[in-house]
Amino acid sequence: MENIELYIEYTARIIEAIGVLTIIIGTILALSKYILAKQDSSQRSYRLLRQELGKGILLGLEILVAADIIATVVTEPSLDKVITLGVIVLIRTFLSLSIELEIEGRFPWQRKSDEKRLDR
C-alpha cells in the first residue's frame, strides 16, 4: 500500500509540474502572438494578449486543482488538510471564474442561455 501512495504522490507532483509548465508555455505563446501580431490597433493586440494569457493561466489552474485533489487523497485525512484543500480549490476556482469573466465577458453558466437566444 505504501508503494501505491508513493506513486500517487509522484503522479500529483508530475501533474503539478505540468500545470506550471502549461502556464509558462501559455504565457510564452501569448507573448509571441502579441509581439508578432500585425494588427491595425495596439488596443486590439493588447486584448488578444489578455485573452491568450488568460486561457493559458486558466488551463494551468485547472490542472493544478486536479493535482491538489490527487495529492490530498494520498495523505491521511484530517480536518486541517481538508480545510486546506477546500481553501486552495476555492481560491483557484475564484481565479478561474475571474479569468473566464475577463476573457469571455460573461460567466460560464451564462453562455448556454446566450447561445439559445441566438439560435432563435
Image (spheres, rainbow, N blue to C red):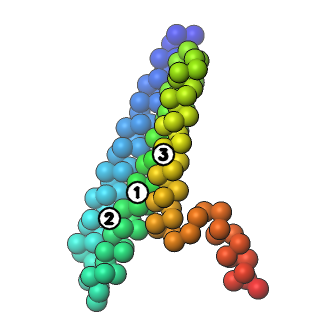
Residue 92's label in the rendered image is 3
Q: How crowded is mark 2: few (under 14 residues within 10 Å), some or many (20 or more)?
A: many
User: Label for residue 93?
Assistant: none
| Residue matched to label 1 | 56
Judge left or right: residue 97 versus residue 111.
Answer: left
Q: Are marks 2 and 1 in contact (CB under 8 Å)?
A: yes
User: Which amino acid type corresponds to the residue marked 3 in the rendered image?
Assistant: Arg
* Quadrant in which the C terminus is drawn: bottom right
SS of the residue at dot 2?
A: helix
In the image, 62 versus 5, the foreground residue is: 62
Q: Where is residue 103 in the image (x, y as percent from the top left)?
A: 46, 67
* Three-letter amino acid code of the residue under disc 1: Gly
Q: Is mark 3 on a helix, strand or loop?
A: helix
Tell which circle, 3 or 1, labels the residue nearer the N-terminal end.
Answer: 1
Residue 30 numbered tag: 2
Which x, y percent locates residue 52?
Answer: 39, 66
Residue 41 quadrant: bottom left
In depth, the one of 4 and 23 nearer the eye is 23
Residue 38 percent across, percent down from the top left: 26, 83
Number of other residues with Cα within 10 Å of mark 3, as a class: few under 14, some 14 to 19, many 20 or more:
some
**Cα gap from disc 2 to disc 3, whole angstroms:** 21 Å
Question: Which is in the foreground here, disc 2 or disc 3?
Answer: 3
Say which quadrant the N terminus sits in. Answer: top right
User: Which type of secondary structure does the marked residue at label 1 adopt?
Assistant: helix
Q: Is residue 35 left or right of residue 65?
A: left
